[in-house]
């Protein structure tokens, strides 16, 4: 890309001459200035340029702006070159060396101009390159820090979430060992059910961790097939209510077509997670609304609860792996469900959004673009 040279020379003849000699090799910004030199000059000094030529007039009128621009660009090198006659150089200003990076004496000698320009622009390029490398390094360091944080969160959450079900499985095994023969059948059945629940919690967690791994390797698959969405949602509600032990009422409302091409293997964990979160994070006696509306071009699935809500500051990070909102202490969880939900919905080319009012309600809305597979509805 051509380097941009700004010419802030008050003297018209010098300006034109310089502009002509540079036009072939550089992109020249040379404002036609008359009485409004200060206004135009200040404006131009805010533009993007790689080197600036100034003369006595510019130093006199625009010094403050030039210093500000240098300061703003620092630590990147932005050269200012002073065009002057040999006899005038001493008159120009005190501390000239702080303001300029080189001098070119009038009358201009082309070879001197070209050489100085190249040297200065090379320094500018190196300085830009150095800055870019520093930024990359900084980014890499941040990424590594993030990764380390993620790793420790992973270890602490996963080990904690494994320990709980493992402890209860081990407790139940002891009960069976000690009292197994004497336990009444209904107590046995209850214990076995609890055992089953704990095993599915662990399987679920393992599945989620495996999904994360597959996602990182770009190996998540999307296999849509014909699905009756209404039946699918009804079954899922029943499943959540039994498997997850939550007894909140789910107000289910379905509108529109029913048959779609969707990947049920992906939709199942997404909706299960949203519904079980709605139950988990809201009082046992509150109701959950689950509304599905299927229009010609998109399906909208909305799940709303009347629970603890999500603080506004947590919303932007909510779909990041292992992220849990600041008010989630006291509720078991891993912060994986929503990250996975987002991935799965995006595989359907859809989107998932959240809105919440702390201590009042939370809504998750999924939109998926679709084509119906048939025109039936019941
Ligand atoms: P978790 O296993 O922690 O529930 P998720 O990924 O499903 O993980 O959710 C991430 C976080 O989002 C939760 O830890 C919780 O802080 C917040 N959250 C999700 N759903 C709700 C909800 N319905 N009400 C309040 N907070 C929620």
Image (spheres, rainbow, N blue to C red):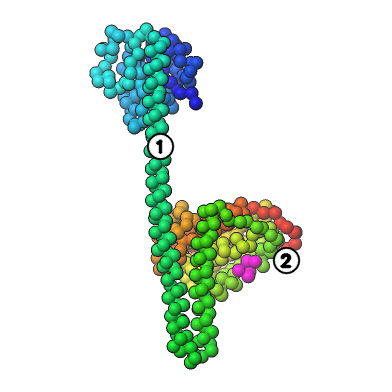
Residue in the picture at 38% in, 46% down: 141
Front position in the image: 188 or 134: 134
Name the side, left or right, on which 164 lies relative to 65: right
Type of secondary structure dominating the magenta stretch: helix
Q: Earlier in the sequence, mark 1 or mark 2?
A: 1
Where is 96 relative to 374, above or below?
Answer: above
Quarter of the image where one finds residue 40: top left
* Separation of marks 1 and 2 at Cα, in angstroms: 62 Å
Q: Which residue is mark 1?
A: 133
Residue 128's x, y, as percent? 40, 31
Residue 265's x, y, as percent? 62, 63
Residue 353's x, y, as percent? 53, 55
Residue in the picture at 60% in, 64% down: 268
Magenta stretch? 232-236
Front position in the image: 136 or 256: 136
| Label 2 packing within 10 angstroms: few (<14), some (14-19), many (20+) | few
Q: Which residue is mark 2?
A: 378
């Amino acid at each position: 890309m051509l380097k941009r040279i700004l010419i802030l020379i008050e003297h018209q003849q010098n300006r034109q001459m310089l502009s002509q000699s540079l036009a072939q090799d550089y992109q020249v910004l040379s404002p036609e200035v008359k009485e409004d030199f200060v206004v135009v000059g200040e404006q131009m000094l805010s533009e993007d340029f790689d080197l600036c030529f100034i003369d006595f007039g510019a130093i006199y009128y625009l010094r403050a702006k030039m210093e500000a621009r240098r300061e703003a660009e620092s630590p990147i090198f932005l050269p200012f070159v002073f065009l002057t006659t040999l006899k005038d150089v001493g008159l120009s200003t005190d501390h000239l060396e702080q303001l300029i990076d080189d001098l070119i004496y009038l009358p201009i000698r082309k070879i001197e101009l070209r050489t100085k320009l190249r040297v200065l622009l090379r320094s500018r390029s190196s300085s830009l390159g150095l800055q870019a490398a520093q930024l990359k390094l900084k980014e890499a360091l941040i990424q590594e820090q993030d990764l380390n944080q993620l790793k420790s969160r992973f270890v602490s959450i996963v080990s904690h979430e494994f320990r709980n079900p493992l402890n209860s499985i081990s407790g139940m095994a002891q009960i069976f060992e000690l009292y197994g023969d004497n336990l009444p059948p209904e107590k046995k059945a209850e214990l076995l059910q609890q055992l089953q629940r704990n095993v599915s919690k662990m399987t679920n967690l393992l599945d989620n961790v495996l999904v994360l791994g597959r996602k990182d390797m770009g190996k998540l698959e999307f296999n849509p097939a014909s699905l009756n969405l209404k039946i699918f949602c009804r079954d899922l509600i029943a499943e959540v209510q039994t498997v997850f032990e939550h007894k909140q009422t789910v107000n289910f409302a379905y509108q529109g077509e029913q048959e779609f091409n969707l990947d049920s293997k992906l939709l199942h964990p997404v909706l299960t997670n949203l519904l079980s979160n709605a139950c988990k994070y809201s009082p046992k006696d509150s109701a959950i609304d689950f509304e599905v509306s299927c229009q010609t071009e998109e399906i909208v699935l909305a799940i709303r609860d009347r629970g603890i809500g999500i603080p506004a500051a947590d919303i932007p990070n909510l779909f990041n792996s292992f992220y849990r909102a600041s008010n989630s202490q006291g509720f078991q969880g891993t912060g994986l469900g929503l990250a996975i939900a987002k991935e799965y919905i995006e595989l359907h080319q859809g989107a998932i959004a959240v809105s919440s009012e702390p201590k009042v309600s939370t809504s998750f809305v999924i939109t998926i673009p679709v084509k119906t597979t048939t025109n039936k509805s019941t």
